[in-house]
Amino acid sequence: MNTTAFNALHRAAGAKMVSFAGFEMPIQYPGGILHEHNVVRNGVGVFDVSHMGEFEIRGSGALALIQRITINDASKLVPGKAQYSAMCYEHGGIVDDLLVYNRGDHYMLVVNGACKDKDLAWVLKHAESVEDVTVTDVSDLVHLLAIQGPKSLDLVQRLTDAPLQDVAYYSFVDGMFANQPAIISRTGYTGELGFEVYFRGDVATAEAVVARLFEQGQEFGLEWIGLAARDTLRLEKGYCLYGNDIDDTTNPIEAGLGWITKLAKGNFIASDVISAVKEQGPTRKLVGFVMKSEKLIPRAGYAIVVDGQTIGKVTSGNTSPGLGTGIGMGYVSVEFAQPGSAIEIAARGTTFPAEVVKVPFL
């Protein structure tokens, strides 16, 4: 397994380490998942997300390549702006969801760690037909910390001279962070105010940055947060997780990603297939649901049932710390996708009542 530059710090903090996306990563710390979840919702926590992949796209053909392989309209991006997007296979299934950063003289794609190798192969394949474009995988050079929570602005501002109050959602600035050159962006995967810090350097440099972060974060109650709480936080906000809620068998329209699918920008990979699905209407949709029984925590893979008939399956599920009940997402036949629809989740040889609701849950 690969390790991030913060591995020794996670171990020193008592983290439970697991294999994730080819890396040894912290799933939780001694305080537990519920505690970590509430730290982010009420204060500020820091995630090591250095397993994510970063590709730099350079050359006069960079925008043409990105427009070809992604479903959003990257031509709308000005320097200093980021965009949520996705790449699709020719049949409309999703290769991965990702972020596109306009860095001024080049673009940066940030992809899911578990998808990095296949994503890179996909980008390189299509770069072959575009003139004057260079794709560079810089994932192993980049450290990435996500500092999330309502107190994140006050904390991060102490470590940089960049005016963070002026950084709008899905925007970023270049500046010094804890004495290191960094990209400081505001996207987030928790639904809270938060910032991502991309920087480079050896392990000693990375540990020095964290030391300064925790030194300044002491009065804010800063804590490390693991992957388990990251999952409960994103689920409460209805954010998709690749490999669960979206994958190569799902298209953007049925996954509720029509808002980032810009068919008007012109042809891109799978635009014809996606256009047809939009015109005809999908046969299933990704929905959120809340359990009406305390006897079951929904889990990925459970069948979704109505009147004894399977109409879909759960793709993500857990207990919501904020609501105190089970919540989940899953694909259901379109006739049962309206909020208020009564459904059942099948498990342990029986079914448990649930209700389709609008996301986010909180």
Image (cartoon, rainbow, N blue to C red):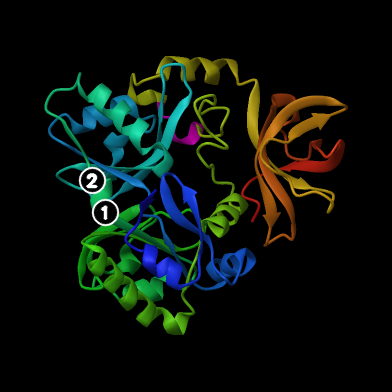
Measured from the top left, where is residue 75 in percent x and y? Answer: 27, 35
Answer above or below: position of 187 versus 88. Answer: below
Magenta-highlighted residues: 258-262
Q: Tell me: 322 left or right of 203.
A: right
Answer above or below: position of 177 versus 258. Answer: below
Residue at coordinates 34% horizontally, 68% vertically from top-left? 165
Residue designated by label 1 = 142
Report helix, strand or loop for mark 1.
strand
- Amino acid marked by disc 2: Val
Answer above or below: position of 221 versus 33. Answer: below
Inspect the magenta stretch and tell me whether residue 133 lies in it: no
Q: Residues within 10 Å of mark 2 (few under 14, many from 20)?
A: few
- Front residue of 133/262: it is 133
Q: Are marks 1 and 2 in contact (CB under 8 Å)?
A: yes
- Amino acid marked by disc 1: Val
Give the Cα separation between the discs numbered 1 and 2: 7 Å
- Front residue of 225/192: it is 225
Residue at coordinates 44% horizontally, 67% vertically from top-left? 11
Residue at coordinates 43% horizontally, 53% vertically from top-left? 24
Q: How many marks?
A: 2
Residue designated by label 2 = 138
Measured from the top left, where is residue 191 in percent x and y? Answer: 52, 57
- Front residue of 278/10: it is 10
Report helix, strand or loop for mark 2.
loop
Which residue in the rendered view is the most extreme toward the bottom?
219
Residue at coordinates 83% horizontally, 29% vertically from top-left? 306
Which residue in the rendered view is the most extreme toward the front?
1
Measured from the top left, where is residue 116 in percent x and y? Answer: 36, 38
Q: Main secondary structure of the magenta part?
A: helix
Measured from the top left, where is residue 147 in percent x and y? Answer: 41, 65
Q: Residues within 10 Å of mark 1 (few under 14, many from 20)?
A: many
